[in-house]
Amino acid sequence: MHIAPDLVSPEKLLLAYGTAAAAGAMTVKFALDSVRERGVVSLFTRAGLSTAAVFCFFQVFPHYPVGVSEVHLILGSTLLLIFGAAPAAFGLALGLLLQGLFFAPFDLPQFFANVTTLIAPLLAIKFLADRIIRRDTAYVDLRYSQALALSATYQGGVVLWVAFWALYGQGFAAGNIASVASFGGAYMLVVLAEPLIDLAVLAGAKTVRGLAKTGLVTPRLFA
């Protein structure tokens, strides 16, 4: 998710280093849990698959500038449900970095702000998933209401972080608030599609339960 270049001045972007570091610390915690659960090879493999998916979301899927940022179909809850929290977080960060290095170098100064915008909501839905999904329920057996809750929380978190960076960087002028509102309204339309995509992907996963033994997906997908 790319906030507009120069939306936040370089001196104000120092805050993004702190927010990204906090998100990174939680990601490392989940990564260590993942290594204990399935080993380092599984973690790296899932992170690589997640990175490829995120790069596709950013660069291949349609995306449109609206207001203070761009509207992307970023399937944060899908990544979490298929690969797990740490691989999904690594994928979001590395996919964003690859796009910046090769296709959008003008986004690199805002990299840590954008990383925060993507990963902080992902960590939030990890905690939400632990609360609303019973431990004896596999992710492939999710109900629509649960998928909707995860998607709405992730997409809402992205919108809130973009709004924060915009207001922090440009203040509360009427034009800036209008741009934030237009972005938020357009982006929340993704909530209508993502739960259906999640359920479709999970339904497909049910037909390939052999993946459970490969280490390519999170253990919670099937167990």
Image (cartoon, rainbow, N blue to C red):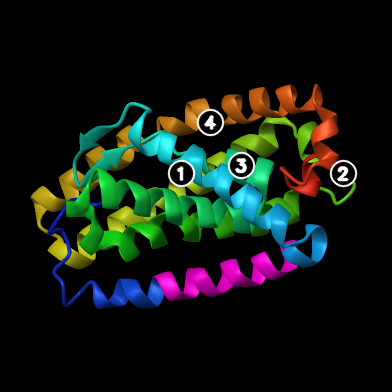
Q: Amino acid at mark 4?
A: Glu
Q: Secondary structure at mark 3?
A: helix
Highlighted magenta segment, given as a residue range? 20-34
The residue that label 4 is drawn on is: 194
Secondary structure found at label 1: helix
Q: Quadrant of residue 172?
A: bottom left
Mark 3 is on which residue type?
Ala
Residues marked 4 and 1 touching at CB (< 8 Å): yes
**Callouts 2 and 1 close, C-beta under 8 Å:** no
Magenta residues: mostly which secondary structure? helix
- Asked whether the viewer can see residue 62, the reply is yes
Image coordinates for residue 118, horizontal then vertical, percent: 43, 54
Q: Nearer the viewer, residue 204 or 132?
A: 204
Say which label, 3 or 4, has the lower sequence index: 3
Q: Nearer the viewer, mark 3 or mark 4?
A: 4
Q: CA distance from mark 2 to mark 1?
A: 26 Å
Q: Which one is earlier in the sequence, the residue at label 2 or at label 3? A: 3
In this image, 222 relative to 62: left or right? right
